[in-house]
Image (tube, rainbow, N blue to C red):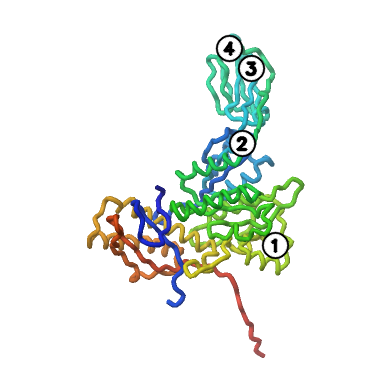
Amino acid sequence: MALGGGQYTTTDKSLAGAYINSVSAARTLDLTGENGIVAIALEHNFGNQGELFKVRTSEFRENSLTIFGYSLFDEKLKGIRELIENSKMVYFYILNKTTKAENAYAIANKGGTRGNDITIKVQTNIDDPKKKDVITMLDYIVIDKQTVTTAKDLYPNILVTFKPDSLLELTAGTKLASGEDGTATNENHQDFLNKLETKSFNVLACMSTTKELQKLYITYTKRMRNEIGLKFATVVCEASDIGGDITMYDFEGVVVVKNKVKGEKVKGNELVPFTAAIYANAELGRSNLNRLYTGEYDVVTEFTQFQLNEFRKQGRFVYHQVGDSVRVLEDVNGLITTTDTKGSEFKDNQVIRVLDALAMADAKVFNEMYLGKVNIDKPGIESLQNKIVEIREAFLAKNALKAYDKKGIKVEEVQIEGVRGAVKVDSVITPAECFRQLYLTNYVQI
């Protein structure tokens, strides 16, 4: 079971774990975790289907050619650049069933049509004419060079695996061929989501533009957040076939990007990577409201004030024009329907990030320090209560909380039929909030 355990309606759980609720208080009435981690599945022309790998910013800058098949500033990597440069770490998953390119000397380690651009060059070694230099190149950039007598002496490099029985005939450059990109199915997306259940991340970026696939991601998000206890947000674009289905995105764990970008071959999902990155990388207790868009796309921002207000009501994450810059209008999620236990503050991503981090911190402490290790007695209950206070003090120190009710934190044992060892914790918190509006009057005195 992932840390957390999910939400509870009544104290009736049968499995060991921490069950955390985040609800609105009645109206009458490193504990903070790591951020900056995004997970994304892509159809790419350089990779192997089912491959899940992580990339940090520094690795991307140094090795983009061998990781993704393109140099750092290639147009093909525009969206990936926006994602990685604004995150700390990204989990990538290859969706499409690729075929590896090959020639008489080697076979590509990664499938896809980009492998067809790999070249093998064989030349006589200058110092020892009995030996040959075998050079692996991509876009005529030398990636590897080995001096050998026969092909059996060649070691695999980061791009290819050599065929040990091949004859090393001299060639000025022979490209690999027959690499294919293939396609992806809904099952491939489900496989990706299944693999993520063992990972910890802040944001899931969904690149699908259709309602059917987006619903798969949203259902997964709700299950993981509410039943398993893995707290993250999923960022999607507004589906091309959304129609009148206004309830599809009505959830605090879903962020819906409204804007499209200008261009001839746009898909409508181009702003998902940047939005996912700034959500994940937002400092705890801080908002992305008025955040500057620093990406490479020409964003469509021709909206009236009336439209912007409507988008906000619809729970859309919108970029708008402010002078010569493009900025985030409101740091909001898709939640529209509010209740007594889930008020309007749950529409604010700043609040959700704090609640998610707090739930994970409480669960981590319980699972690592108390579960199966401490007895439920007066010292044990006092210890847990003090640890709950310590967590909130850490959040307060980071300005993630405006306040919390220290005296109101209560830890008590609860009796549940068929289950032993359950405790219940009540805690009242006030998440931090940023400046949103200014009402100013200048009084003129003569």
Q: Give the mark nearest the N terminus, 4 or 2.
A: 2
| Residue type pointed to by label 2 | Asn
Tag 1 secondary structure: strand
**Mark 3 neighbour density, 10 Å: few (under 14) some (14–19) many (20 or more):** some
Residue 399: where, in percent of width, then height? 45, 64
Mark 2 vs mark 3, CA separation in Å: 26 Å
In front of the other: label 2 or label 3?
A: 2
**Mark 1 neighbour density, 10 Å: few (under 14) some (14–19) many (20 or more):** some
| Residue type pointed to by label 1 | Gln
From the viewer's perspective, is 427 left or right of 160?
Answer: left
Mark 4 vs mark 1, CA separation in Å: 63 Å
Q: Give the mark nearest the N terminus, 1 or 3.
A: 3
Q: Which residue is mark 1?
A: 321
Mark 1 vs mark 3, CA separation in Å: 55 Å
Q: Give the mark nearest the N terminus, 2 or 3.
A: 2
The quarter in which the C terminus is drawn is bottom right
Q: Which residue is mark 3?
A: 104
Q: Give the mark nearest the N terminus, 4 or 3.
A: 3
In front of the other: label 2 or label 1?
A: 2
